[in-house]
Image: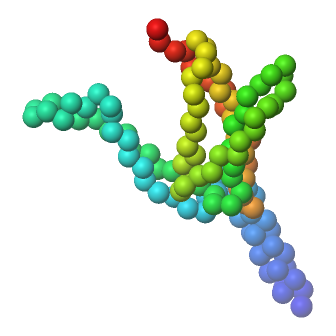
Amino acid sequence: MTSEIDLLRVENDSLKNIVAEINSKYVFDSIFVKTSNNPDNSLKLNSDYKMEIMIVGYNSDKSYLVAYDKENDNKINLDTLNHEKGIYKYNTKLTNDLNKVFIDVHIENNYGKKVTGILADRIKTKN
C-alpha cells in the first residue's frame, strides 16, 4: 500500500510539472499559414519578388478584439471585431490629418498564457 501511495505521489508531482510547463506557454486551438505579397512586386521578368509567410496561431472561441474611439479618455463607438482563422479585419475612414486607432486585445485560452493589451496607432494622411 505504501509503495502505491509513493507511486501516486510521484505521478501527481509529474502531472503538476507538466501543467506548470503548459501554463508558461502560449497554447492555441489551431494554426495556419498566411502569405502576404509585397505591394512593390512588379511581377516583371527577372524582377525580384518578395513575400511574407506568417504562421498564425489562434483560439477560436476565447480571443477577441474591440476597436473604439476615445473622447475625453472615455471609450466610444465600441466595435467587436470578428475574425476568420485568427485574422481580424479593421476598416476605418481617415477623416482627419492625424487619425488615432485604439484596439483592446484579448487572447485567452483554458491553458497557457493569456495576452491582454491595447493596440494604439496614429495614421497621418498625405496631402
Q: Residue furthest right?
A: 2
> In the picture shown, does residue 55 fall above or below 28?
above
> In the picture shown, does residue 9 fall above or below 127?
below
Question: In the image, residue 22 lies at what x, y percent?
Answer: 69, 59
**Residue 7 or residue 102, whichever sits in front:** 102
Residue drawn at x 43%, y 53% as measured from the top left = 33
Question: In the image, residue 14 lies at what x, y percent?
Answer: 75, 69
Residue drawn at x 69%, y 52% as measured from the top left = 63
Q: Residue furthest top?
A: 127
Residue drawn at x 89%, y 91% as measured from the top left = 1
Observer able to see residue 95: yes
Question: In the image, residue 73 lies at what x, y percent?
Answer: 84, 22
> In the picture shown, does residue 83 fall above or below 116?
below
**Residue 120 or residue 116, whichever sits in front:** 120
Side of 17 where 122 appears, left or right: left
Observer able to see residue 113: no
Residue drawn at x 61%, y 63% as measured from the top left = 29
